[in-house]
Amino acid sequence: MRRFVRDNSLSLFFLVAFVLALIGQSFAGNAAVNEDRLAEGSAPLSWAEYVTSSDFAVDVAENWQSEYLQFLLFILATVWLVQRGSPESKKPGDEGTEDDAEQKVGRHAPPDGPDWAGAGGLRQGLYGRSLGLAMGAIFLLSWLAQSVAGTAAYNTERLTRLEDPVSWGQYALSADFWNRTLQNWQSEFLAVLSMVVLSIYLRQRGSPESKPVGAPHEATGVEG
Amino acid sequence: MRVDRTVRAATAVVACAVGLTCLAGCASADEEPAREAARRFYDALQARQPERACALLVPEAAESLASGDRTCASTIAELDLPGGEVLDAEVWGDEARVRLARDTVFLHRLPTGWLVRGAGCAPRRDLPYDCEVST
């Protein structure tokens, strides 16, 4: 048990942090919505009603989609684009999907490697892109969830203002949907940019996301 | 083995995202009670029972019709609210729009049931409906 915790401490830390933050968001969001509802004379929502409401769903989904888009783009962009001096980047000249020997696939696959890396054809092609495909699928589903939940939340607001509700398609083209979407995207892109550039010049001793403290600024793709 | 674990984890996250979508999509299931509340409101007006009609308004709408020595009932009795057969209804959260043959009614759900918050409403291009009864 102790060994399991030690071997998986990074995943466990973020799993616990995620669950605590989501629970915290559900209570804070419920309180915020109930302040508004009491001010307009409506009955407050219970916690169970709030966490199954479109308001909660859209708030969760819009953050999920942007996080998964961030990682999807980072995974895909770093195949083809480089940043000299960044530990997040491959060395200039190494751009591209690399050959089978470098990627340890097909006949170059080690015996203890994943089965599908040693297999040929579609299975190898699929497994060789499985991380991007999984992140991309979760991004698209979260974005879809945001648009569906957003339609419900937006239409509730519109009816309150004595306006006609809109269809899902109209909402997906609306300012509200794109404002929610782009305000999340810009912050994710800025965070990635900061990580790529700051890691050229700054260090975090012991972190694999940083170069070793003494590594030169020009060293690229070196993790500490 | 490692592939299985990855697929299981990805499936769990995808299931959550699909769950969120379903959750949000199930927002507008109960239209009939809203239709019924709109019908009751117009039935009261047609039966010349303005007090009963006022009791079916949200308090803010009823208060907006009372001023000076005029009560909600006396004001609403003089309004020529057209009504007609219920054509369709849309419910989103605790709000509803019910379209009748000659009117559009907006309703709000309270713990006691649906009450009218807008009636005698005429659409205006790119603006909220103009309602003879509103909050």
Image: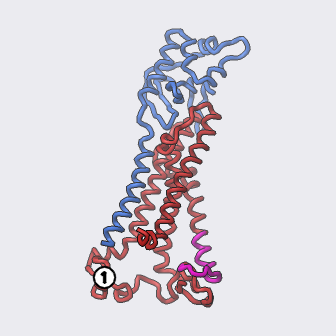
Q: Which chain is blue?
A: B
Residue lying furthest right in this view? B68
Instruction: Determine the residue positioned at 53% across, 37% down.
Output: A164
Q: Give the overall secondary structure of the magenta segment.
A: helix
How is the structure coloured here?
by chain
Q: Residues within 10 Å of mark 1 (few under 14, many from 20)?
A: few
Q: Is residue A198 magenta?
A: yes
Three-letter amino acid code at the position of disc 1:
Asp
Give the quarter of the image for residue A3.
bottom left
Q: Kindly identify which chain the residue marked by label 1 belongs to.
A: A
Give the quarter of the image for residue B27.
top left
Instruction: Determine the residue positioned at 48% across, 51% down.
Output: A147
Residue A27, position as x, y percentages in the image: 56, 47
Residue corresponding to mark 1: A112
Instruction: Determine the residue positioned at 51% across, 80% down.
Output: A81
Please tell me which residue lies in front, A46 or A136: A46
Instruction: Determine the residue positioned at 41% across, 70% down.
Output: A4
Please tell me which residue lies in front, A52 or A206: A206
Considering the image in quadrants, where does the C terminus of chain A appear? bottom right
Q: Is residue B58 above or below residue A63?
A: above
Residue B104 visible within the image: no
Q: Is residue B81 magenta?
A: no
Assign a secondary structure to mark 1.
Answer: loop
Residue A193, position as x, y percentages in the image: 60, 73
Picture mark count: 1
Please tell me which residue lies in front, A93 or A63: A63
Q: Which chain is red?
A: A
Q: Is residue A184 above or below residue B32?
A: below
Highlighted range, magenta: A191-208
Considering the image in quadrants, where does the N terminus of chain A appear? bottom left
